Image (spheres, rainbow, N blue to C red):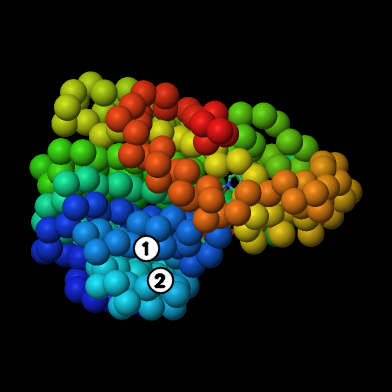
Amino acid sequence: MRPTDTAQTASGQHCDTLAVVTGTSRGLGAALAHQLLGPAACVIAIARQESPALAAQARGTGARLHQLTGDLSDPAQLQRLCDEMIAALPARAERMLLINNAGTVAPIVAAEALQAEAIHLASQAMQLNIVAPMALTAAFLQASTGRSQDRCVLNISSGAGRNPMAGWATYCTTKAALDMYTRVLKQEQAALGVQGARVVALAPGVVDTGMQGEIRAADPAAFPALGRFQALHADGQLSAPEHVARRILAYLARADFGQTEIDDIRNYD
Ligand SMILES: NC(=O)c1ccc[n+]([C@@H]2O[C@H](COP(=O)([O-])OP(=O)(O)OC[C@H]3O[C@@H](n4cnc5c(N)ncnc54)[C@H](OP(=O)(O)O)[C@@H]3O)[C@@H](O)[C@H]2O)c1
């Protein structure tokens, strides 16, 4: 699909903050994009579906929004989305952010059941949760060099990448890989001195999104911790995406962003 611009095209313009956010059609990514869309911002939003709510907000505020649609788990579409993201970058921005947020928890099955359809889903999850952030980060870093003094990459990780959870072999593995990727990236970027980007893999806590609904709908035989997640929801323990997004954006604005490359937003309660 062709990218859709609302208000002005992001490319060729100057803006205070340029933010590329993936997974913006719902959940945490939608909340992040809504809060980033201000008069002096350019937002490049990536998901399989456009968000009419984001488009309406941009029209109302005059903010620069560029929505790119495609499947990040498909290698050919991922390459196209990287190219379209580069084409949409403004010539210059005070600050440039890439938030790799899109992700999937599927398939929720025992490791010994990872065959047939489940292994196909696992392969898509590897592409979406780890290959897409790596490709988008590479494209973002190469294309943003010299366009901004302040470049940040935030990978939305999970406690699941740091603690094993039965039934989540794929999800835990991809988030652990995202953490290690972030550590390597930090080493490389730190070697560039002030030219290097600041990078963090951040766990957002338990957020009330469609992903949590999917978790609560899992087969109890495949996911022994199901009752715990159902109780968290029943007891009102899930954080609202808008609340978590506000805290993440405050975290991104910290002067020490990037010093702790493996982090958890709950450390800042
Ligand atoms: N919710 C939690 O409790 C929780 C906890 C820890 C970590 N996280 C992490 O936080 C991030 C956001 O999660 P969420 O809870 O907001 O998830 P969500 O509600 O399931 O939303 C996922 C977003 O990713 C997009 N997406 C999914 N598959 C895609 C694909 N193949 N290509 C392009 N975009 C795709 C979806 O849009 P489309 O369907 O339109 O493509 C949607 O906008 C994820 O990385 C997740 O692992 C969440």
Q: Residue at x 44, y 78 (%)?
A: 52
**Camera sees residue 187:** yes
- Local packing at callout 1 (Cα closer than 10 Å; few below 14, some 14-19, many 20+) is many
Image side of residue 265 versus residue 99, left or right? right
Q: Position of residue 251 (x, y in %)?
A: 41, 38
First of labels 2, 1 by sequence position: 1
Q: Secondary structure at mark 1?
A: strand
Label 2, on which residue? 54
The type of residue carrying mark 1 is: Ala
**Which mark lies nearer to you, 2 or 1?**
2
Q: Residue at x 42, y 27 (%)?
A: 261
Q: Position of residue 19 (x, y in %)?
A: 30, 54
Image side of residue 127 versus residue 148, left or right? right
Q: Position of residue 60 (x, y in %)?
A: 32, 77
Label 1, on which residue? 45
Q: Quadrant of residue 18?
A: bottom left
Q: Is residue 16 above or below residue 197?
A: below
Alpha carbons under labels 2 and 1: distance apart: 9 Å
Tell me whether the residue at label 2 lies in contact with that at label 1, contact meaning CB atoms closer than 8 angstroms. yes
Image side of residue 253 versus residue 30, left or right? left
Image quadrant where one finds the N terminus:
bottom left
- Local packing at callout 2 (Cα closer than 10 Å; few below 14, some 14-19, many 20+) is many
**Camera sees residue 110:** no
Q: Residue at x 53, y 51 (%)?
A: 243
Q: 205 or 247: nearer the eye?
A: 247
Q: Which mark is residue 217?
A: none
